[in-house]
Image (spheres, helix red, strand yellow):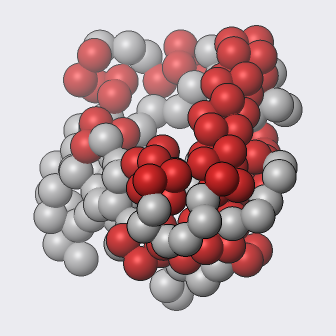
């Protein structure tokens, strides 16, 4: 991993005090460094933020309901519903999120195609869209990655 030099904090870049961020319950992330985080969809419903625990959870469920419906009508890998499910299961990371493990840039990375295919195969025949959030239990390299110590 590349060495990070002179990282820039959100507070410094935007002129916001770290105390104000803390009082609002926010973190003070580095803007030019990826953060080794894993977004856990199971926590959306438990969020203290009303937009997240209502709107976000509803959007999450709708998104994966479409995926599950496509897998349920798929008859074989690479048929039209399978391809639609593949498009629905986008594992790329928007560069502005900085949630990956990129070392030389902030862009992070997406998961390899073989992981997406494994998730689709595991999800085949599923009827519960929220089971996708449990993929870390079923598939290797899905979900949080233990940090190297």
Image quarter for residue 17?
top left
Report how many numbered discs are placed on residues in the image.
0
Q: Does residue 55 appear to the left or right of 116 in the view shown?
A: right
Q: Position of residue 59 (x, y in %)?
A: 64, 25
Query: Foreground: 126 or 143?
Result: 126
Location of residue 107 in the rendering, given as x and y in whole percent from the top left corner: 22, 51
- Where residue 9 sits, quadrant-wise, is top left
Please name the residue shown 20% across and 61% down the image.
4
Instruction: Give the vertical position of 2 relative to 49 (above or below).
Output: below
- Image coordinates for residue 72, horizontal then vertical, percent: 70, 55
**Residue 40 at least partly seen:** no
Above-or-below relation of 101 to 137:
above
- 4 with respect to 15 (left or right): left
**Residue found at x 52% / y 87%:** 149
Front one among 108 and 14: 108
**Left or right of 146 in this view: 130:** right
The quarter of the image holding the N terminus is bottom left
Above or below 30: residue 141: below
Residue at 67%, 29% (x, y): give it: 62
116 vs 15: above or below: below
Residue 79 visible in the snapshot = yes
Question: Which residue is at 50% across, 59% downward?
Answer: 82
Query: In this view, which residue lies farthest toward the bottom?
Result: 149
The x and y percentages for residue 30 are 33, 41
Left or right: 106, with 25 as reference point: left
């Amino acid at each position: 991993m590349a060495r990070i030099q002179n990282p820039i904090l959100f507070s410094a870049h935007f002129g916001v005090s770290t105390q104000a961020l803390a009082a609002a319950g926010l973190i003070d992330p580095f803007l030019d460094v990826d953060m080794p985080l894993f977004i856990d969809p199971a926590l959306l419903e438990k969020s203290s933020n009303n937009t997240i625990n209502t709107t976000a959870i509803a959007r999450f469920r709708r998104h994966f309901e479409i995926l599950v419906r496509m897998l349920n009508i798929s008859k074989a890998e690479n048929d039209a519903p399978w391809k639609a499910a593949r498009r629905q299961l986008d594992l790329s990371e928007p560069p502005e999120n900085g949630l990956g493990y990129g070392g030389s840039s902030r862009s992070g990375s997406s998961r390899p195609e073989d992981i997406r295919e494994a998730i689709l195969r595991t999800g085949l025949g599923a009827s519960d869209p929220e089971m996708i959030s449990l993929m870390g239990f079923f598939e290797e390299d899905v979900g949080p990655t233990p940090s190297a110590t």
